[in-house]
Amino acid sequence: MRVAIGCDEAGFDLKELLRAHIAALGHSVTDFGVRAGETALYPDIAFAVATAVAQGEHERAVLICGTGIGVCISANKVRGIRAAQAHDSYSAERAQKSNDAQIICLGARVIGPELARSVVSSFLGSSFEHGRSGPKVDRILEYEKAQSRAP
């Protein structure tokens, strides 16, 4: 799977750890930054990652900031994106299985390294289960399309 990853300076150390973990799981990883010693506005990183996912360049992504909240809000502003914040493995799994989320958002000041690895593994190891959740996700997509046509 092609996975994008990005963070602000608060998430740099966790991003580096997770980048290596994702590669070790056998996925290709594209790093959208930040780099060591850089600073960035988290919305800019989140917009870049979410746009790459929305355009089909990557199937999934991991975004990290201090809390995970800012990157999640920002990523969800990109049309076609469903980003979910998760700090436990069950929520990460359900983000994909129930909501077909393409992006998982983590808070580097909220979650430790071992749990973060588990969360990412659960997210990347899960697939959308259309069943009962399909009509709900379809409704989200319908609403989004209607909003893009609104004046």
Image: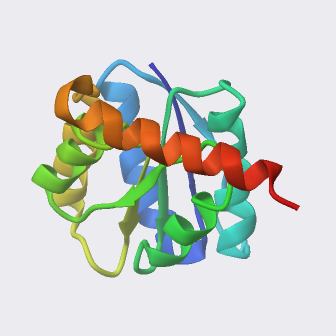
Question: Considering only vertical position in the picture, is 83 above or below 20?
Answer: below
Where is residue 109, by image quadrant?
bottom left
Question: Is residue 34 visible from the viewing direction of this image?
Answer: no
The quadrant of the rendering that contains the N terminus is top left
Report x, y in % for residue 113: 23, 61
Which residue is depicted at the point 25% across and 37% down? Answer: 133
Using the image, determine if residue 67 lies above or below residue 132.
Answer: below
The residue closer to the viewer here, 141 or 117, is 141
Residue furthest right in the image: 151
Q: How is the image coloured?
A: rainbow
The number of callouts visible is: 0
Q: Position of residue 151 (x, y in %)?
A: 88, 62
- Let me know if residue 10 appears in the view: yes
Q: Is residue 94 left or right of residue 34?
A: left
Say which residue appears at 65% left-offset and 24% top-offset: 56
Q: Residue at x 65, y 72 (%)?
A: 42
How far across and how far down the image is residue 76, in percent? 57, 59
Splitting the image into 4 quarters, where does residue 142 fall?
top right
Q: Is residue 34 left or right of residue 111?
A: right
The foreground one among 23 and 124 is 124
On screen, residue 9 above or below 91: below
Residue 132: x, y in percent?
18, 33
Query: Residue lying furthest left in this view?
Result: 90
Q: Is residue 31 left or right of residue 95?
A: right
Q: Residue at x 37, y 64 (%)?
A: 106
Residues 66 and 88: in front is: 88
